[in-house]
Image: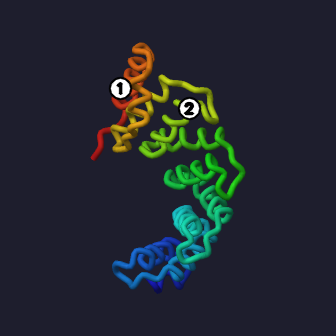
Amino acid sequence: LERAAGLGHVAATYNLGLLHLDGQQLPQNLDRAAALFRTAAEAGSPEAQYALGTLYKEGRGVPKDPKESARLLASAARAGLVDAEVEYAIALFNGTGVAKSEAAAAALFLKAARKGNAIAQNRLARILASGRGVAADPVAATKWHIVAKAGGAGDLWLDGFVADLKPAEREAGEKAAREYLAHLPPRT
């Protein structure tokens, strides 16, 4: 792996960075992990962009830098990496390292939610329930909350929100969730 990374193999460079990050097969070295991720990110690896963006977000192996984190996460999100879409949407929603845009965050959460990311589904449900960045839609909020719960992302606040809805809204959301879940491929 070290040799392939030295020869400029992008995937090897990224994977070597992971080994230095987790410290399982190699001693943990966050500085080396960040340097390897940077090399792979500059070569266009969305996974490395996401990994390096996360390090900048947390200040691990590099100085904490919300703007650089957001830039890297945005690049990985544009490449379609679902975890980056979620993290960048959170940055957009909160205005962390990037201009705050609840509407752009909602659109990105929807994109990631449709890819099956339970965190995005939960965040989207909360946004739809509160009407932040989008028009409030209790039926859609219910749908995405149920879908997120099926994916393992429960939320007591949303449980209460759904319980307090008018029966017709709650039933419409439950029906939409059942239909959505019925069309998903079986989990393996």
Tell me, yes or no, whether the two marked residues, 1 and 2, touch with CB atoms within 8 Å.
Answer: no
Can I make out residue 45 in this image?
no
Q: How many residues crowd mark 1 within 10 Å: few (<14), some (14–19), many (20+)?
A: some
The residue positioned 45% from the left and 40% from the top of the image is: 122
| Position in image of residue 72 (x %, y %) | 62, 62
Name the one closer to the observer, 4 or 102.
102
| Position in image of residue 164 (x %, y %) | 42, 22
Q: Residue 50 is drawn in which quadrant?
A: bottom right
The residue positioned 38% from the left and 83% from the top of the image is: 26
Q: Which residue is mark 2?
A: 130
Q: Residue 106 is drawn in which quadrant?
A: top right
Residue type, numbered disc 1: Arg
Name the one closer to the observer, 127 or 87.
127
Q: Is residue 73 above or below residue 55?
A: above
Residue type, numbered disc 2: Ser
| Position in image of residue 185 (x %, y %) | 34, 38
Q: Which residue is mark 1?
A: 178
The secondary element bearing badge 1 is classed as helix
Name the one closer to the observer, 40 or 120.
120
Residue sitting farthest toward the top: 168
Q: Nearer the viewer, mark 1 or mark 2?
A: 2
